[in-house]
Amino acid sequence: YKMLTGEFPRKVDDPEKEYMFSILELGKNIQPIHPSLVNKEIPEEVGDAIVKCIQIKRAERYKTVEELLLDIGMYEFMS
C-alpha cells in the first residue's frame, strides 16, 4: 500500500505516530482508504486487490497467489 500510494493505509493526524497507529489498529475493524482514491494512477482492480491483501481478518484475504493474480489479470502471464 505505502509503496504505491506513499501513505499508510489508515490516516492519523500526527505523522510521527502514523506507523505505530497502523500497527496498533490491526486489532480494530478500520477499513483502509482505497489506494485508487489516494493515487489516481492505481487502477481500481489493483486497489481492490491491495485492500484485500491487507485485510485484518485472514478469511477476507487471498488464500493463494493465484487468486491474487486472477484478480489483477496477471495469471495468464504467470502460468
Image (tube, rainbow, N blue to C red):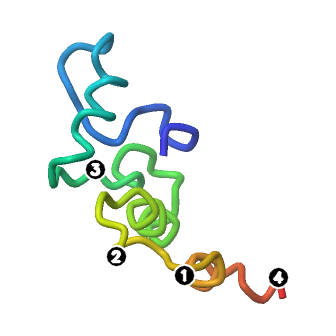
Viewer-side label of 3, 2: 2
Question: What kind of residue is marked 2?
Answer: Ala
Are the residues tagged 1 and 3 within 8 Å (C-beta)? Answer: no
Question: What kind of residue is marked 3?
Answer: Pro
Q: Residue drawn at (22%, 13%), measured in percent from left and top?
A: 14
Q: Is residue 31 left or right of residue 68?
A: left
Name the N-terminal-most of marks 3 and 2.
Answer: 3
Q: Classify mark 1: helix, strand or loop.
A: helix
Question: What kind of residue is marked 1?
Answer: Asp
Are the residues tagged 1 and 2 within 8 Å (C-beta)? Answer: no
For disc 4, the marked residue is: 77
Are the residues tagged 1 and 4 within 8 Å (C-beta)? Answer: no
Seen from the viewer's position, the closer of residues 38 and 57 is: 57
Q: Classify mark 4: helix, strand or loop.
A: helix
Category of crowding for the residue at label 4, using alpha-carbon neighbours closer than 10 angstroms: few (below 14), some (14–19), many (at least 20): few
Name the N-terminal-most of marks 1 and 4.
Answer: 1
Q: Residue drawn at (49%, 32%), measured in percent from left and top?
A: 6
For the residues marked 1 and 4, what is the alpha-carbon distance in whole angstroms? 13 Å
Name the N-terminal-most of marks 1 and 3.
Answer: 3
Seen from the viewer's position, the closer of residues 21 and 51 is: 21
For disc 3, the marked residue is: 32
Q: Residue drawn at (25%, 33%), measured in percent from left and top?
A: 24
Are the residues tagged 3 and 2 within 8 Å (C-beta)? Answer: no
